[in-house]
Image: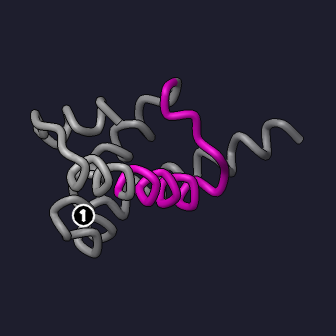
Amino acid sequence: MEDVKRELNITWSDAHTDRRVEEVLKRAQSVINRAAGREIDLESHDFARQLFFDCCRYMYSDAFAQFKVDYADELLSLRLEGQEDVQTES
């Protein structure tokens, strides 16, 4: 959560803000996993991690619908990458 708060330039801590950031974090993780078609390890996947932070920023700013428009190509790339990984494993 501290990484997300740092990305969102949140330098304070209070219960309301922390709860909101935690909700955004969970929703953004779900969005990235769904776009990828699999569970993503954000610690080892830099591209997905950056998308996750961008998604958090849009969600926190109440602009999630715009995120899907602005990052459509990147989300598609993440999906295609996952499909290539599955084909390679087969």
Residue 68 sits in quarter: bottom left
85 in relation to 19, above or below: above
What residue lies at 29% left-to-right and 38% top-to-bottom? Answer: 4
- The percent coordinates of residue 48 (x first, y second) are 44, 40
The outermost residue toward the top is: 44
At label 1, the amino acid type is Asp
- The percent coordinates of residue 54 (x first, y second) are 27, 49
Q: Which residue is mark 1?
A: 70
- The percent coordinates of residue 39 (x first, y second) are 64, 46
The outermost residue toward the front is: 15
Which of 5/85 is in front?
5
What residue lies at 52% left-to-right and 58% top-to-bottom? Answer: 30
The residue stretch that appears in magenta:
24-43
Q: Is residue 78 magenta?
A: no
4 in relation to 68, above or below: above
Q: Is residue 42 magenta?
A: yes
85 in relation to 43, above or below: below
Which of 76/33 is in front?
33
- The percent coordinates of residue 50 (x first, y second) are 33, 38
Examine the residues drawn in magenta and state their main secondary structure: helix
Residue 23 sits in quarter: bottom left
